[in-house]
Amino acid sequence: LTVVALSGLAAACGSGSGSGAASPPKLEFRNPLRIPPLLQPRPGKDGVRRFELTMQAGRTQILAGKQTPTWGFNGTFLGPTLRARRGDKVQMTVRNRLPEVSTVHWHGMRLPARMDGGPHQPIQPGAEWTPHWTIDQPAATSWYHPHPHGSTARHVYRGLAGMFILDDDLDLELPAEYGVDDIPLILQDKEFAEDGSFGGDPLKGTFGILGDHILVNGTHDPHLTVTTERVRFRVLNGSNARMYRLTFADKRRFHVIANDAGLLAAPVEVEAIELTPGERAEIVVAFAPGEQVVLRSADNGVDIGEGDFDLLKLVAAAKLKPAPAVPARLAALAPITPPAGAKVRRFKLGGHDSINGQEMDMTRIDEVVPAGAVEIWEIENTVYSHNFHIHEVAFQVLDVDGSAPPVYSRGHKDTVYVPAKSVVRLAVQFGHFTDPTSPYMYHCHLLRHEDSGMMGQFVLVKPGTESQVNRTLPGHG
Ligand code: C2O
Ligand code: CU
């Protein structure tokens, strides 16, 4: 058993078994919540937004009096928040100053496969990668993280992750002042060894890491002072495996306004929401002057969601700036409707390392999809918890074991929980960037599973050319 001293308060921490059942250390909410800085693009006369990201190693004080070896973008831990608007041209310069090869994937972005930053776009140590694309999708909370095949769990766990906010021209009265009433919350669970380093093996056990310390934006034991009557939180589950059931200690209700891929048609009032790794939700919470409330994650009885955890104390200022009510209508959400006779593809998640009986192979194209198609993807989970993420697309959940999904998760998404022994059916809208030789990924976003081979590859091609695709790609390295 590892024992970590928490500022004089001795707390018994996880045994490293990955069971997630250890009782979490009690929080005192001593540290102000860190807000990742907004990355300013380099100005240019051509209107292109040029962002520069450098992947680097360093040490970060996360626990009082300890230095944790970490990785980050433009800093030692996590990364800055990127922001762009529909119609913007963006140009990235991603430098790798790490001692090993990595990639940077834009999770949730609709873009050509060669710009996607998956395992086929490696950045060697000392090298840089310069993808560029035009933002052409609705407002959403997306994110970026490494995706080198076999090492994603380790690279993300070390700290490489950041938020990427997309805006559009919808004129809605929603809280939108970054860091004031529009607040990112990146949730990540960690184990700490006695010397302050991240403990545990991201590839151990059934699910990998299920740590007993939950950091919010890299902050341990956090509090946040709110200054407005309503606050929008953009919640990202950036954990390797843990699922959260987010709720407030006083059971207050709040509004869900967006899923992974954008705003809902209308806000949905709830008492709790569940988020598996890679998923995002935007919520709006109302506050009364002077009150305090704790955001928590409640045990949901699921193997990757065990344990009750306090996450963040919210402290409302004595006087709050007035904020309008959440608008009754949000987005003109076009339902993703499969046409009659839509193509159905079936994916069986087996154990922790295969889809349809096969492990990921970088040289094998598993699926060939005509550009612009709307298809039904049926994900069957035969054993324990998984989730499922598809690059480049937006989808809607048709049903989970024949029942409609919770109302708050009926918007456009790119990642979905697939409960043990169940079948999830998705209506998937594919994009228009064709390239028969450059695949996109689909995979379980429990990173230990993804790294072990629970991942496959698809290409988007001109409709009618499916049969001409060479299913074997040249090997790498
Ligand atoms: Cu968030 Cu394929 O990844
Ligand atoms: Cu999985």
Image: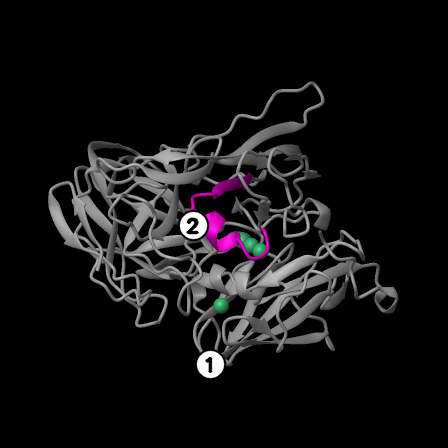
Of 170 and 231, nearer the camera is: 231
Camera-nearest label, 1 or 2: 2
Q: Position of residue 31 (x, y in %)?
A: 23, 36
Q: In which quarter of the view is residue 438 placed?
A: bottom right
Residue located at (48% from left, 62% from top):
448
Q: Position of residue 475 (x, y in %)?
A: 75, 57
| Way the structure is coloured | one colour
Q: Residues within 10 Å of mark 1 (few under 14, many from 20)?
A: some
In the rendered image, which quarter contains the N terminus? bottom left
Which comes before the other along the chain, label 1 or label 2? Answer: 2
Q: Which residue is mark 1?
A: 421
Amino acid at the residue labelled 1:
Lys
Label for residue 448? none
Question: Does the Cβ of the disc 1 residue fall within 8 Å of ligand 2?
Answer: no
Q: Which residues are magenta?
A: 148-166
State the SS at label 2.
helix
Q: Amino acid at mark 2?
A: Tyr
Disc 1 and disc 2: Cα gap in Å?
A: 28 Å
Residue placed under numbered mark 2 in the picture: 157
Residue 157 in the magenta stretch? The answer is yes
x and y percentages locating residue 409 in the rendered image: 47, 62
